[in-house]
Amino acid sequence: MAINQISGNIYSAPGNPVFGAPKNVPLSPRDTDNRPVDQPSRGTRQDVDTQESTPHAQTDPASSPGALTTAERMLLAELKNADTQVRQHEMAHVAAGAGIVTSGASFTYKRGPDGQNYAVAGEVSIDAAPVPGDPQATIRKMQQVRRAALAPASPSPQDIKVASRAAALAAKAASELMILQARERTAANESQAFGNIRTGSDQYTKVNTLPGKDTRAIDLTI
């Protein structure tokens, strides 16, 4: 149950990172004859791992619950539990990643002793790229990527890796935003300062161009 990165991690998909559940297949127990359950015996089929986007269950007519050994029933219970956990894990990624998820969950399946396929790993593609030229939008997006990565109850090491990368990108975007805001404040202060200088200069020009004292009027009164 992990998340892949655009930069090319384990489950990378072209152009998109992936939330993925790591394969965690229960070990095949042995029956009372010390034969592996996943070997063709007692009417059971050999286990097969498959990668599919949707479940594809197959039932072996020769494998019925009553025909399973105790070891096979234990394996079947483990597979069912793994299937539930994997699906819940991926759905947590999907729910928290609404808007950045680019594909539905796909799963890797293992054939159980009952002939059914059970999900043992999965992945969900997401868009975790920064927003070009918009650090504020990048911060919001990376916050969601981090939430989506850590949404499952037990994030995998790859999930944590993606969350750390998203946090680093958000921090970088925050630094870029601070620089951008500082430049905007500087430009505004300069504009205001030069505006005051121009206003003062205009006032001086108006005063300097006022007409001087009319000396002719003084002469007439003498």
Image (cartoon, grey):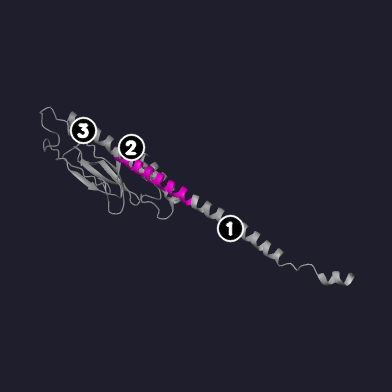
Q: Position of residue 142 (x, y in %)?
A: 40, 46
Report, in whole angstroms, how far the alpha carbon at label 1 lies from the one at label 3: 79 Å
Residue that appears at 23% across and 43% down: 109
- Residue matched to label 3: 75
At mark 2, the secondary structure is loop
Q: Position of residue 32 (x, y in %)?
A: 12, 27
- Residue matched to label 1: 194
Q: Is residue 124 above or below residue 220?
A: above
Report, in whole angstroms, how far the alpha carbon at label 3 lies from the one at label 2: 24 Å
At mark 1, the secondary structure is helix
Is 9 positioned to the left or the right of 144 in the image? left
| Stretch of the chain drawn in magenta | 158-181
User: Which residue type carries mark 1?
Assistant: Phe
Is 213 positioned to the left or the right of 202 in the image? right
Disc 1 vs disc 2: Cβ atoms closer than 8 Å? no
Give the class, few, some or many, for how many residues have Cα within 10 Å of label 1's Cα (few <14, many ≥20): few
- Residue matched to label 2: 155
Is 146 positioned to the left or the right of 9 in the image? right
Is 86 positioned to the left or the right of 132 in the image? left
User: Which residue type carries mark 3?
Assistant: Leu
